[in-house]
Amino acid sequence: MILEDRKIKEIEHSDRRRSIVTAYEYQTDSADYHCKQNFTEGSDEYVKHFSNMKFYSITQSSFAHRDSLLYENIAGAVALDYCCGNGEVAIEMARRGAKKVMGIDISEVAIKNAQELARVQGVGDICEFRVMDAEHTEFADNTFDIVHEYGALHHLDLKAAFAELSRILKPDGKLVCTEAMRHNPLIHWYRNRTPHLRTQWEVEHILGVPEINSGGAFFSSVNMRMFHLAALAAVQFRKASFFRPLLATLEMIDNFILSIPYLNRLAWVAVVEYRKPRKSVK
């Protein structure tokens, strides 16, 4: 298989990250030492390549919304963790009752991590992980009831990804996506100032509302909710005793601010549910 240069760079970037953190990367900054000790290799490399993990200390509300969409009616489902990384969500889908879970990623290191984590978590018989190009998967049409995607669409050719996801999703299935947004100039300034944390393609293809809505060409139903603007102010206090009440207060402010059209585009994260795939789209 001949890969484009951008995909080779993505593999190199992902392999490096998944060699440093082998599981639960979005929890490492706020997790206890036991978690870091088990899944993080090389403290110096972690500090360099995962310095942005501190921001994920405030993402409980977006994760909770994602989970409410993802795990509803998952019992007995055939599910896919699309660009699965270390496989944590695939494993959770299995634990929540999915009868079969596939996980795919372009990184062989990530797939090996996911296979080992599934074995340790006791769901290795339900989960299957494969190295695969997400823009050209090996699955048959109408394979999956539920597809999960987290922070991967901006690594891909978006039209190709949407076309493939629409093809492999069952007509009554759903695709649940979580993506960072590009509209906030301060957040995007930070991305440009930290090039070692991401590939150049990734920086240049962070999604905005138009890109998210472009999925409407492949899915008849698109529902989007924005998260995390005022809440970002709590990040610097994530180790303080008053962090939880502070975050709760800032999230109440966000609930108001992010209900305002156009102003909500300044949010950091969007959670999107796509339904009713358009099977005739090529």
Image: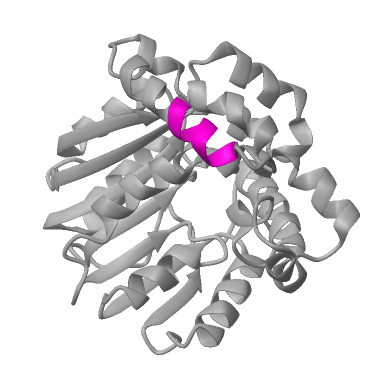
Q: Height in image: 6 above or below 269?
A: below
Task: Pick whichever, 153 or 7, lies toward us.
Answer: 153
Q: Height in image: 169 above or below 199?
A: below
In magenta, the rendered stretch is 243-249
Q: Quadrant of the C terminus?
A: top left
Query: Magenta stretch mostly in which secondary structure?
Result: helix
Q: Height in image: 12 above or below 208?
A: below
Kindly identify the residue that appears in the image at 29 percent across and 51 percent down. Answer: 165
Q: Height in image: 59 above or below 213?
A: below
Kindly identify the residue that appears in the image at 48 percent across and 45 percent down. Answer: 152
Where residue 262 appears, x then y in whole percent?
33, 9
In the rendered view, does 241 fall on the left or right side of 275? Answer: right
Q: Quadrant of the N terminus?
A: bottom right
Q: Quadrant of residue 89?
A: bottom left
Kindly identify the residue that appears in the image at 62 percent across and 76 percent down. Answer: 112
In the rendered view, does 174 fall on the left or right side of 11? Answer: left
Q: Quadrant of residue 172?
A: bottom left
Where residue 23 appears, x then y in whole percent?
62, 66
Can residue 181 be seen in this snapshot? no
